[in-house]
Image: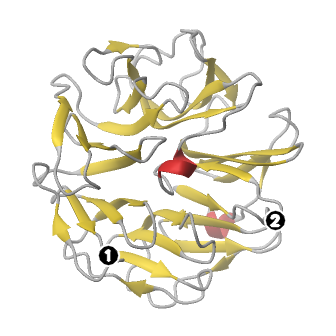
Amino acid sequence: MTFALLFVGLFSHGAAQDSGPKSSGQQYLYAAVFLNSGSGAVGTTSNIGLFRRGVGDTAWQNTYHPNLFTFGLGFWRRGLTQRYYVAAGNGLHRSSDGRKTWRILTSWHTKEVLSLALDPIDSSLLYIATPFGVFKSSDDGAHWVKKMNGMRRWFVRQVVIERDDRRMLYAAAKDDLYRTVDGGERWTGLHVGVEGILCVLAFNAKTLLVGSEDHGVRVSLDGGKSWRSGEGITQTAIYVLRGSPDGTVIYAAGYRSGLWKSVDAGLSWSLVWPAPDLEAIYAIFVNPNEPNNLLVGTNGAGIYESRDGGKNWSGTGLVGAHVRQIEIYP
């Protein structure tokens, strides 16, 4: 059996699949920009859409659609086949020719796509999270079917595939975290104990973390049977959770929270960077080739970068941008 390389985003499958592709070819940082409230992005006249810069460069260039409300990114590769995905306000976009041309895969039924999950083996299997529920395509995006059996609320912010079982997925919904073990045919609520689930990080079938609107991080070490609050990071909205490439560190951030980290699977948290001037952090990126190199995407202040594990930070472009995801792809 041949496995694909899969990297998808807004909010990850787990540390190993979060880390991004490692190869000898040229790598680029990609950023999903949803809004721009400033003077424009550094190095370009476009304000929103998909942006790219070389690793080590400073200027970001719009690489697709200068007026596209962009929520998330995805990348799928097997052999010489590469596919780039953009989750956007008008649907799911895909390029199969190195970003030269793009097409929208979804119809008006699934117009606003908040995140996506790509099957790691079968490129024809696609899942998307929308304000109207989870949708699945089994024919490479030609047709989409709503998969909500067992869910009580429609609004789903994120869907992710469990790294060790491609038929197991998690959906971060308005009222709970849901799990399916049969590719979306039936969902079961995991009774996190709080509502307003904003993001999920599935390290494996046993270790689950969610970020919520008002209650920080909730953690389960037994596959969702029981939950507890992460110590030190309660009473705040957490928008993003991200694991380090080696799986030893988890980062979290949200509304006026700064950047936090945990080294014990989310049970306790310490503040890495208070970020007093930032209203919110939407995206976290950990460089797979240099783990002390961190980037965060903010709510209206562009991207900030640290090269010493979070001790010191500096702005690194896209001034004024609301950045929802940062990844490293070819």
| x then y, percent, for residue 105 | 76, 58
**For this rendering, which residue is in front, 208 or 196?**
208
For the question of whether residue 113 can be seen, the reply is no
**For this rendering, which residue is in front, 187 or 43?**
187
For this view, does 133 lie left or right of residue 251? Answer: right
Q: Which residue is mark 2?
A: 140
Q: Of label 2 and label 1, which has the lower sequence position?
A: 2
Name above or below for residue 307 compared with residue 229.
above
**For this rendering, which residue is in front, 13 or 91?**
13
| x then y, percent, for residue 46 | 59, 20
Classify residue 308 by image quadrant: top left
| x then y, percent, for residue 189 | 36, 84
For this view, does 179 lie left or right of residue 128? Answer: left
Amino acid of disc 1:
Asp
For the question of whether residue 205 can be seen, the reply is yes
**For this rendering, which residue is in front, 168 or 147?**
168
Q: Secondary structure at mark 1?
A: loop
Q: Quadrant of the C terminus?
A: top right
Classify residue 143 by image quadrant: bottom right
Q: Secondary structure at mark 2?
A: loop
Q: Callout 2 environment at 10 Å: few (<14), some (14 to 19), or many (20+)?
A: some
Q: Callout 1 environment at 10 Å: few (<14), some (14 to 19), or many (20+)?
A: many
**Residue 176, labelled with which disc?**
1
Q: Residue at x 51, y 90 (%)?
A: 149
For this view, does 155 lie left or right of residue 85? Answer: left
Q: Residue at x 76, y 54 (%)?
A: 4
Amino acid of disc 2:
Asp
**Mark 2 vs mark 1, CA separation in Å:** 29 Å
| x then y, percent, for residue 30 | 60, 30
Q: Quadrant of the N terminus?
A: bottom right
